Amino acid sequence: MAGTEYNISIWPGSSSFSVGDTPFGIYDSDSVFQTDADKFANACARRLGYPITDIELQDINFYACLEEATNEYSSLINQNNIKDNILYITGTSTGNDLTQTVVPSTLDFIITLAGDYGSEANVGGTIPYHTGSISITKGQQTYDLNALVRDVVHPDDNIEIKRVYHYAPPAINRYFDPYLNTGLGSQNMLEQFGWGDYSPAITFLMMPMYADLLRLQAIELNDEIRKSAYGFELINNNLKIFPIPTENITLHFDYILKSERANPNRFNTSGSLVSDSSNAPYSFIEYSNINSVGKNWIWNYGFACVMELLGWVRSKYSNIPIPNADVTLNGPELLSQAQTMKQELIEKLKEDLEAMGRRNQMERAADESQFLQDQISKIPLRIYIG
């Protein structure tokens, strides 16, 4: 065909790969890729009928198809890994290359998400707490914290009160040390034991723990029944405290800024953290690190790409005139077969990757454990007679 007016380039039968022969040059410096490139070109040409049939392609066309197939394989592998690991890598640095690395199961991101609940429950979290105080005036029971705090300290923001430090002193503060003889109760107990005549500087008497609990409960119950209970009511940052203050005191409280709770970027402090699959740190897999199973998939997909490319070429030159006849090329058939082959290969690889995913492997391990237990349960046990 090279002698016709179409001047179509055909495969000469051999090639010699060199750096720069692929469109992107991703694997050009890989020695294994360099060796396989010429072997791949020769194998594809022979599968398409060379030397019986001319192949209207050049060596760089074969190299481009091999690079495309390797890219597709790498992309599908990385997509599957990202889907399996996105929960564990979200929030980590994008500077960590996770290609072909083991990503352990961690609770870091789950704990980070749970931090919002911790902030609301005042047990940690990611939202900063601010402290404030107001002066309580004797006889005044209601105070507007918006006017006293927000309008003064945060005029451009809204506050939300999280905790008010207004409660009765702990009962333990009004209870003597149960191990130190400094109280009348201990002295009375010493006299009951017949030790009243002894008056050492320090005397220790071991008392049961339930005695401490009973005394604390008695003090708290006394406060609840015989005294006004300490408490407060908070509605729209309007604070009403109980009982009515009988002296001037300072009341402390914790609050948050609503703008800080609503800030979606409060986790992303460095600006280079993994947020989704678009910036997950997975790069192209090195060709030399791919095993035989992966290379076989790449060669088959690459051959489908070669068939597709040859089909486009032959579709353009559908009829080649020769003396006293025309040669009809099989471009449409090659295109159809190539597209079907590529789709089947992609679907098969996705199925395999799904079966090898983290979830399916855990389910398989659970099934194997159950099967093993079933087998062990059917083994007869020996009876020992002493």
Image (cartoon, rainbow, N blue to C red):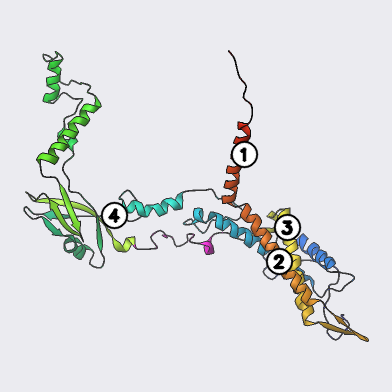
Q: Which residue is mark 1?
A: 371
Q: Which residue is mark 4?
A: 129
How far apart are the alpha carbons under marks 4 and 3?
56 Å
Q: Residue at x 10, y 49 (%)?
A: 243
Q: Give the mark toward the camera: 2 or 4.
A: 2
Tell me which label, 1 or 2, sits earlier in the chain: 2
Q: Residue at x 16, y 43 (%)?
A: 168
Q: Amino acid at mark 2?
A: Lys
How far apart are the alpha carbons under marks 1 and 3?
35 Å
Q: Amino acid at mark 4?
A: Tyr
Element type where label 1 sits in the image: helix
Element type where label 2 sits in the image: helix
Element type where label 3 sits in the image: helix
Q: Relative to 328, is 268 on the left or the right?
A: left
**10 Å crowding of disc 2: few (<14), some (14-19), many (20+):** some
Q: Relative to 326, is 84 on the left or the right?
A: left
Q: Quadrant of residue 334?
A: bottom right
> In what quadrant of the picture does the C terminus appear?
top right
Q: Which residue is mark 2?
A: 342
**Circles 1, 2 touching at the beta carbon (< 8 Å):** no
Q: Which residue is mark 3?
A: 295
Residues in magenta? 262-282
Q: Is residue 175 above or below residue 101?
A: above
Element type where label 4 sits in the image: loop
> In what quadrant of the picture does the N terminus appear?
bottom right
How far apart are the alpha carbons under marks 2 and 4?
57 Å
